[in-house]
Image (cartoon, rainbow, N blue to C red):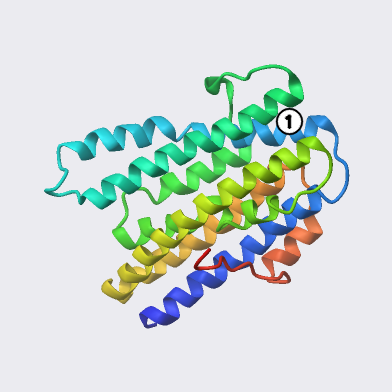
Amino acid sequence: MDASAFISQVEAVFTRYWGGHFEVVTTFFAKPRAREQLIAWLDLQLYKEIHVVPGKAQALIDMYDKLDAEVERGDYEAEAYELADEIQHYRLLADIRELITGKKLKATEAAPTPEQLKLEAVRSKYDGKGALVKAVGGFSPGGGTAFAAAGTMIDGGPIERQLAQAFRIIYRQELAHYNQRRLVFDRLAHDSEPSEYAQALQYARELARQHFILRNESFSFPLNSERVAEIDAGKVTPYVPPRLY
């Protein structure tokens, strides 16, 4: 398998499940939902946005001593912006949750679900592998932006309109992260030995599917098991993030 064929296979895996992400969100918001379901999704999404902050902050600290030596200043800036974006996403959604409930949820009270823990286990399984395998994780922000893109289409009452506004901000930022990481992945794919492709492709399969399963859980399973099986089989419109916006 050459690099172009490998990239196409990895992209096909992700775009299929991103189509699933898009369908989960649009299906959930296609009809009125119980307040408890919306809050349950918000609680998990807040966890997803904020629990990465300590690690990213530590990474910035660790990179500081290597700046302009082993660490390029552009990479340092990008890491700082990504940290700021995660905090902004948390703030936007936490504000909406507070509007709905009238109560604040402390950042440390946000907790993972079982499917979120499974996703983290998939990532941990491949942690410490080579640069190409690590770069596969760059496909994951926002379900390849499908999650946030679907969110921009939400319509309805005041809460739905607030969410759509938040998603427009999240979408733009996640798309920028995806485009940057995708360039890195494509370069590494061409620079790596073909012997590295199999493990990277396996990681792509596990990561893409578990992220989709988590998305469906987080929205209280708007897609039933039969529809999930169809998406596993490729019976879905693939979602391909636009390269420019």
Q: Tell me if 185 is positioned left or right of 161 in this view.
A: left
What residue sits 58% from the left and 26% below the top? 110
Asked if one can make out residue 22 in the rendered structure from this viewpoint, the answer is yes
Placement of the N terminus among the 4 image quadrants: bottom left
Residue 108 percent across, percent down from the top left: 52, 21
Classed neighbour count for the residue bearing mark 1: other residues with Cα under 10 Å, few (<14), some (14–19), many (≥20): some
Q: Which residue is mark 1?
A: 39
Asked if one can make out residue 113 in the rendered structure from this viewpoint, the answer is no
Residue 187 percent across, percent down from the top left: 32, 70
Identity, as a three-letter code, of the amino acid under mark 1:
Ile
Q: Tell me if 39 is positioned left or right of 170 in this view.
A: right
**Nearer the observer, 224 or 18:** 18
Q: Is residue 138 above or below residue 92?
A: below
Residue 92 percent across, percent down from the top left: 60, 34
Residue 10 percent across, percent down from the top left: 49, 70
Query: Which of the 4 quarters of the picture holds residue 217?
Result: top right
Q: Is residue 7 above or below residue 18?
A: below
What residue sits 85% from the left and 39% below the top? 33
Secondary structure state at the residue bearing disc 1: helix
